[in-house]
Image (cartoon, rainbow, N blue to C red):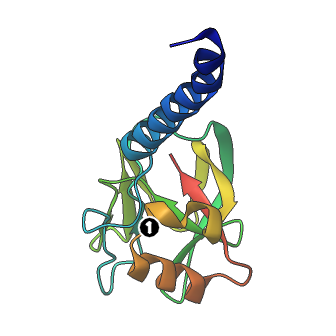
Amino acid sequence: MSMLTDRRIAPVIAGLAVSVVVLLATALFWRGPGPDLPKPVDGNPVLTHGQSGPGMLASLHGTLALVDGCLLLGGEVVVWPPGTTWDEAQQAVLYSELVLQPGDELPGLAGGVLPITEFGRFLHPETIARARACSDDDTLTIVS
Protein backbone atom coordinates (compact mmCIF):
# COMPACT_ATOMS: atom_id res chain seq x y z
CA MET A 1 0.00 0.00 0.00
CA SER A 2 1.10 3.50 -0.61
CA MET A 3 1.52 6.11 2.09
CA LEU A 4 -1.58 7.95 0.84
CA THR A 5 -3.78 4.82 1.18
CA ASP A 6 -2.44 4.14 4.69
CA ARG A 7 -3.42 7.64 5.79
CA ARG A 8 -6.97 7.18 4.48
CA ILE A 9 -7.47 3.77 6.06
CA ALA A 10 -5.97 4.56 9.49
CA PRO A 11 -8.91 6.75 10.66
CA VAL A 12 -11.39 4.11 9.47
CA ILE A 13 -9.58 1.37 11.38
CA ALA A 14 -9.36 3.56 14.49
CA GLY A 15 -13.10 4.34 14.25
CA LEU A 16 -13.96 0.66 13.95
CA ALA A 17 -11.78 -0.19 16.94
CA VAL A 18 -13.50 2.46 19.07
CA SER A 19 -16.93 1.16 17.97
CA VAL A 20 -16.02 -2.40 18.97
CA VAL A 21 -14.80 -1.24 22.40
CA VAL A 22 -17.99 0.76 23.00
CA LEU A 23 -20.20 -2.17 21.97
CA LEU A 24 -18.31 -4.57 24.24
CA ALA A 25 -18.43 -2.18 27.19
CA THR A 26 -22.16 -1.68 26.68
CA ALA A 27 -22.77 -5.43 26.54
CA LEU A 28 -20.72 -6.06 29.68
CA PHE A 29 -21.83 -3.19 31.90
CA TRP A 30 -25.35 -2.18 30.89
CA ARG A 31 -28.17 -4.40 31.92
CA GLY A 32 -31.60 -3.59 30.67
CA PRO A 33 -34.86 -4.93 32.05
CA GLY A 34 -34.85 -8.69 32.11
CA PRO A 35 -36.30 -11.70 33.85
CA ASP A 36 -33.64 -11.60 36.58
CA LEU A 37 -34.91 -8.29 37.98
CA PRO A 38 -36.73 -8.78 41.30
CA LYS A 39 -40.51 -8.72 40.94
CA PRO A 40 -42.62 -7.18 43.73
CA VAL A 41 -44.68 -9.53 45.89
CA ASP A 42 -48.35 -8.79 46.55
CA GLY A 43 -48.93 -7.59 50.10
CA ASN A 44 -45.22 -6.95 50.63
CA PRO A 45 -44.33 -3.24 50.82
CA VAL A 46 -40.59 -3.81 50.16
CA LEU A 47 -39.60 -2.93 46.58
CA THR A 48 -36.15 -4.11 45.47
CA HIS A 49 -33.90 -3.17 42.57
CA GLY A 50 -31.60 -5.35 40.51
CA GLN A 51 -28.38 -3.45 41.03
CA SER A 52 -25.80 -5.27 43.07
CA GLY A 53 -22.32 -4.24 44.02
CA PRO A 54 -21.10 -0.69 44.59
CA GLY A 55 -23.81 1.91 44.44
CA MET A 56 -24.47 5.51 45.26
CA LEU A 57 -22.56 7.04 48.11
CA ALA A 58 -24.90 9.72 49.43
CA SER A 59 -26.01 9.29 53.02
CA LEU A 60 -29.76 8.74 53.41
CA HIS A 61 -31.43 10.02 56.55
CA GLY A 62 -35.04 10.33 57.61
CA THR A 63 -37.95 8.48 59.13
CA LEU A 64 -39.20 5.30 57.53
CA ALA A 65 -42.98 5.35 57.00
CA LEU A 66 -45.53 2.82 55.79
CA VAL A 67 -48.43 4.65 54.12
CA ASP A 68 -51.14 2.77 52.22
CA GLY A 69 -48.81 -0.19 51.64
CA CYS A 70 -45.93 2.02 50.46
CA LEU A 71 -42.59 2.32 52.26
CA LEU A 72 -41.46 5.93 52.21
CA LEU A 73 -38.43 7.85 53.38
CA GLY A 74 -38.90 11.59 53.54
CA GLY A 75 -42.08 11.20 51.52
CA GLU A 76 -40.29 9.37 48.67
CA VAL A 77 -40.71 5.71 47.73
CA VAL A 78 -37.83 3.56 49.00
CA VAL A 79 -36.33 0.89 46.75
CA TRP A 80 -33.99 -1.55 48.48
CA PRO A 81 -31.11 -3.70 47.21
CA PRO A 82 -31.55 -7.38 46.38
CA GLY A 83 -31.99 -9.59 49.44
CA THR A 84 -33.96 -7.02 51.45
CA THR A 85 -37.19 -8.52 52.77
CA TRP A 86 -40.31 -7.68 54.76
CA ASP A 87 -41.00 -9.47 58.05
CA GLU A 88 -44.77 -9.51 58.46
CA ALA A 89 -44.65 -10.56 62.13
CA GLN A 90 -42.34 -7.66 63.10
CA GLN A 91 -43.79 -5.28 60.49
CA ALA A 92 -40.18 -4.52 59.61
CA VAL A 93 -37.74 -4.26 56.72
CA LEU A 94 -34.86 -6.72 57.05
CA TYR A 95 -31.92 -5.05 55.37
CA SER A 96 -28.43 -6.43 55.81
CA GLU A 97 -28.11 -6.83 59.61
CA LEU A 98 -30.72 -4.15 60.34
CA VAL A 99 -34.36 -4.50 61.36
CA LEU A 100 -36.09 -1.26 60.36
CA GLN A 101 -39.68 -0.55 61.36
CA PRO A 102 -41.94 2.29 60.26
CA GLY A 103 -41.21 5.21 62.56
CA ASP A 104 -37.50 4.36 62.82
CA GLU A 105 -34.88 6.93 61.85
CA LEU A 106 -32.65 5.52 59.13
CA PRO A 107 -29.03 5.38 60.28
CA GLY A 108 -27.36 7.13 57.34
CA LEU A 109 -27.64 4.34 54.77
CA ALA A 110 -25.75 4.65 51.47
CA GLY A 111 -27.92 5.52 48.50
CA GLY A 112 -29.39 8.40 46.60
CA VAL A 113 -32.53 10.03 45.24
CA LEU A 114 -33.26 9.63 41.53
CA PRO A 115 -36.15 9.96 39.10
CA ILE A 116 -37.69 6.61 38.14
CA THR A 117 -36.72 7.29 34.53
CA GLU A 118 -33.01 7.32 35.43
CA PHE A 119 -33.08 4.17 37.55
CA GLY A 120 -35.79 2.23 35.73
CA ARG A 121 -33.44 -0.17 33.95
CA PHE A 122 -32.68 -1.74 37.34
CA LEU A 123 -36.37 -2.21 38.17
CA HIS A 124 -38.90 -4.84 37.14
CA PRO A 125 -41.80 -3.22 35.22
CA GLU A 126 -44.19 -4.18 38.04
CA THR A 127 -41.87 -2.49 40.56
CA ILE A 128 -41.97 0.68 38.44
CA ALA A 129 -45.79 0.55 38.39
CA ARG A 130 -45.98 0.10 42.19
CA ALA A 131 -43.42 2.86 42.78
CA ARG A 132 -45.36 5.26 40.55
CA ALA A 133 -48.57 4.42 42.41
CA CYS A 134 -46.81 5.41 45.66
CA SER A 135 -45.03 8.52 44.38
CA ASP A 136 -46.38 11.98 43.70
CA ASP A 137 -43.39 13.01 41.60
CA ASP A 138 -41.79 9.85 40.12
CA THR A 139 -38.82 10.17 42.48
CA LEU A 140 -37.25 7.20 44.23
CA THR A 141 -35.00 6.90 47.25
CA ILE A 142 -32.54 4.16 46.33
CA VAL A 143 -30.74 2.26 49.07
CA SER A 144 -27.43 0.87 47.78
* Image: 4 above or below 106: above
**Pick the front one: 87 or 60:** 60
| Residue at 53%, 90% in the rendered image | 68
- Left or right: residue 1 compared with residue 96: right
- Left or right: residue 20 compared with residue 61: left
| Residue at 57%, 61% in the rendered image | 119
Q: Element at badge 1?
A: loop
> How many labels, in total?
1
Residue 59 appears in the picture as rendered = yes
Residue 97, image x, y percentages: 35, 41
- Left or right: residue 41 compared with residue 65: left
Residue 108, image x, y percentages: 62, 41
Residue 13, image x, y percentages: 52, 27
- Quarter of the image for residue 133 reads bottom right
- Quarter of the image for residue 131 reads bottom right
Q: Amino acid at mark 1?
A: Leu
Residue 41, image x, y percentages: 29, 79
The residue under label 1 is: 123
* Image: 68 above or below 85: below
The residue most toward the front is 2
| Residue at 38%, 57% in the rendered image | 50
- Left or right: residue 94 compared with residue 10: left
Residue 101 appears in the picture as rendered = no
Mark 1 residue crowding within 10 angstroms, few (<14) / some (14–19) / many (20+): many
**Pick the front one: 82 or 24:** 24
The residue most toward the top is 3
